[in-house]
């Protein structure tokens, strides 16, 4: 058993998951890192945390498999310690695919990883968290989310439906459990993250070109993001954040289109939807 | 005095305002068309409505001038008839301007036309409307709005602030007056409208090129839009719409960015924000 | 084969589904009504449409069963005629249930009916619709949705996650298919509907009390709602609505809390969140 | 001249404004506190900051007066030092008032404090901030906002229209200036704040009862809120938050209605809007 409270990360790669695990370990938690594959990469992350003087352990997990999350939670509470906080960090992005190139199985798997897994994690950890929060520190469930949770782009059928379900589930979990002492935060990551294990793998040999295009400050550094995750977990009960967005300063927020006036003028960007809204302009 | 109920249009040009006036005149209302300038154009619109067998009258109005709207409302109720419905259709779009090119006076004028004028119209017409709605037909206030009411693009400082105020005012008006029998509808026009008096004037000699670029079905036809305005005014009290959006089928909704996967892939469009949201992808 | 184009209703009870089917039959379509159970009720709806001079047929359908929707679509296109429009009207509301009273199977079934079924319907009907829309009338997919698609209340874990997925899927479908001539409309029904087959069954013996509490104009009449569905399907390609909300005039919209100032004042309703936003008030 | 960078607070009372000023002073800034009235209270705040070893100065400011903000900014840059960060914290809440009890002057004053003042502050401080951000630390503009910025409740005509304008202005400022190195953050304070100078004054003799009703953890502590403001200002350029919400854990978020199932069941809360969305329920 660890003398420290446990912070569990579902989806612990070299990007957000690994850095958040490291940040919470540095803050006094025993971090449990769970990921689907790459045992060597997992051991490397755990080693880095321990080298930095933190406490951590890792395990492979197929979150889409029935009972896998539940079994892991039971094992942690029994063998390591009480789960005081958790990060649900599984993605379901598969790139842009036309509807006809999005098979039933893919759409369902997107939901299993993007939404159902979060429901199952909450189902498994909340009962004990609620008990402990009555006269102890509050519980925390941080949920990494994507732009697709708030708007559906072409080709994002599976991803957007899954992420939107994830977002609304965060709201229902918050509505039932915030008053019981569990802080649920839905974090909208609205930009590219410097994450070789996910975006890197998705872009493949385009990855290096992509990074150089983005330039300095042009991609979210997971270490910086982890500081915000940590801050959210430190907010006292009288002042909790449920939703927050983040992006690089030079990235275009999801609600804006190309801010170039020239392009707007010729393309009739929505910046020009205004004049149509009345026959009386200014001056 | 007209034997017909009055439908008042504030901002009656050759685009949305004129077509909505014509549609309500065809539906049995006496349409009162008010616009800031161009007496000849105004007379032409009134003439077209009368030629079609409808009843209408027009007046010039500087809505930004104190008392102008109030005086017009009083005159209509006294000389023409009870205002049963109204359309607030004034725009405040001035194109994209950097903050330093947006003087105090411009920002304030945007608010006067985009938000304050709507408050003043409601202030002036609602008391009588509420009285008449008690044992008569319900009152209607249709409000044309723009994409800028729901998202702020670069260069839209004056317009977005004004339109967002307009949108939220529609919500507070609806909250207080819907139970009293006044239907307030906020209509988000999310695309270019074929309106020579406004977008046409704004784009100037780019107008023809712009229209040809848009192609068939590529610009909202105000006559088509007017049918939706009319439908909203026909909804019975048990089934009212407060907010609705409209755009051409081939236009990109404000919440989507370029749907081209190639562009997304290289530009890191938000369609690709997903993989960063977890270190465990699909298969 | 029918000489009329087909309008397919998935979820055709005595409420929204049946009335929309009747409205489209009156408008010249052959309506195909599909519902999970109650063959007698189904026959009654078809009979009413035919008595009114319309054309319709009915079938029982378990939409949660693999292949069921696909098989139905194939059968209709082969034996009855081309599906020009469809309404996805399946609900997944099971009332408010705490997380611990929401089993895995329930959460998954909510998704199958609330989200996955819509994806499967679009997957099945869109390829032919796109072909026919190239040089014929555009296709239409109307999707009934609920408040839970835009906010997650306590106890709505299964329903909100499913409906939010439904909403975002409508956005991705619209992004890919609107330019190809298919009109996808997401209809947020934000109030109680006078629907004995659904809300009636859910409330059971509370149903009559509930209706009398609501009073005149206090519940959405499905016949009135059907007129708006019909209007949306008539919008030409240059002027399409993607999202619209509806509620009774005296109902409180989902974004408002109790409008009673007294209650706000004592309960610190969000109407009073303002003063905290700055130490300098007005006057 | 101060050797420290300046953090300017517009609306510095004993609540959010004063605590944020203190937090930034503790973090190494010279805090300039500006408020409309109560010179004694202002001196007290400055004294508390200095007693804690921080650097601060105060000034009275009527932000609604033309030129007042501009003159203050010029004076600070000339006499004290470069403004590296600022908080716009003016409120415009006047409680719930019916439209007929909301005079033109009140509606306009709400806009002047809630929206126009922010535009004027940005107009005054951004040019120098942009210059300095090119090869120095980025600039920061934190904007306290209210629930009324995202939804309009009954009686909030003036406040909601002003706050919505404030929110959308934050988006346009962010769109133009984030790429130039200025971090604009819109902070939605969605709950009652323990602020005697504002909510306290508004509620008057109801204040003590209100506080006791709220109980422990039931009101946002401005000191806790200030920690989140500070964190936002520390985010590096690759990872900026534009919008965040905060509330006490046991408060009902603005998008939720009463979570009590009993009440929902009898009042037809939106939790029950679902079943109407289809005639085929679950099981």
Image (cartoon, coloured by chain):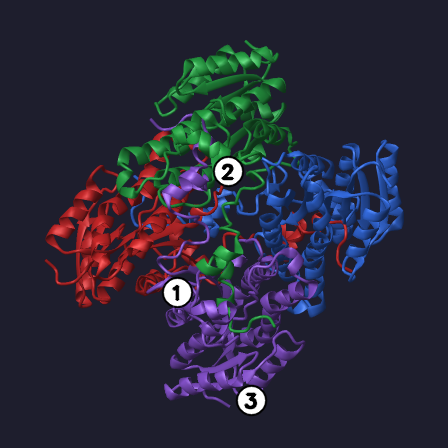
Chain colours: A green, B purple, C red, D blue
Q: Is residue C81 left or right of residue B275?
A: left
Q: Which residue is mark 2?
A: A191
Res. B219 mark: 1
Chain of the residue displaying label 1: B
Q: Is residue D190 visible?
A: no
Mark 3–mark 2 distance (CA, rounded to whole Å): 59 Å
Chain of the residue displaying label 3: B
Residue A51 x, y percent position in the rendering: 58, 11
Helix, strand or loop at disc 1?
loop
In front: label 3 or label 1: 1
Residue D110 x, y percent position in the rendering: 69, 60
Mark 3–mark 1 distance (CA, rounded to whole Å): 38 Å
Task: Compare residues A62 and B211 and report the one nearer the observer.
Answer: B211
Q: Residue at x 63, y 38 (%)?
A: D248
Helix, strand or loop at disc 2?
loop
Eyeballing the image, is A265 above or below A81? below
Residue B37 x, y percent position in the rendering: 56, 80
Quadrant housing residue D235: top right
Chain of the residue displaying label 2: A
Which quadrant holds the C terminus of chain D? top left
Eyeballing the image, is A64 above or below B129? above
In front: label 3 or label 2: 2
Helix, strand or loop at disc 3?
helix
Q: Residue furthest bottom?
A: B1
Eyeballing the image, is D231 above or below A267? above
Q: Which residue is mark 3?
A: B79
Quadrant housing residue D123: bottom right
Q: Residues within 10 Å of mark 2 (few under 14, many from 20)?
A: many
Mark 3 and mark 2 on one chain = no
């Amino acid at each position: 058993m660890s003398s420290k409270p446990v912070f569990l990360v579902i989806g612990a790669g070299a990007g957000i998951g690994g850095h958040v695990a490291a940040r919470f370990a540095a803050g006094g938690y025993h971090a449990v890192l769970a990921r689907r594959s790459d045992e060597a990469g997992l051991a490397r992350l755990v080693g880095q945390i321990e080298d930095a003087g933190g406490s951590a352990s890792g395990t492979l997990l197929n979150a889409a498999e029935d009972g896998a999350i539940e079994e892991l939670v039971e094992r942690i509470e029994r063998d390591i310690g009480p789960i005081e906080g958790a990060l649900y960090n599984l993605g379901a992005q598969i790139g842009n695919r036309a509807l006809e190139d999005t098979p039933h199985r893919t759409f369902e798997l997107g939901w299993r990883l993007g939404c159902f897994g979060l429901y199952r994690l909450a189902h498994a950890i909340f009962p004990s968290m609620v008990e402990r929060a009555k006269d102890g520190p509050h519980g925390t469930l941080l949920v990494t989310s994507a732009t697709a949770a708030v708007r559906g782009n072409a080709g994002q059928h599976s991803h957007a439906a899954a992420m939107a379900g994830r977002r609304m589930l965060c709201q229902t979990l918050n509505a039932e459990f915030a008053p019981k002492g569990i802080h649920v935060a839905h974090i909208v990551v609205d930009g590219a993250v410097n994450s070789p294990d996910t975006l890197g793998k998705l872009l493949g040999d385009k990855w290096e070109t992509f990074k150089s295009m983005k330039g300095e400050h042009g991609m979210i550094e997971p270490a910086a993001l982890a500081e915000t995750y940590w801050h959210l977990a430190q907010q006292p009960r009288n002042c909790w954040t449920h939703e927050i967005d983040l992006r690089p300063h030079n990235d275009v927020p999801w609600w804006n289109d190309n801010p170039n006036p020239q392009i707007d003028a010729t393309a009739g960007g929505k910046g020009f939807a205004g004049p149509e809204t009345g026959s009386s302009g200014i001056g």
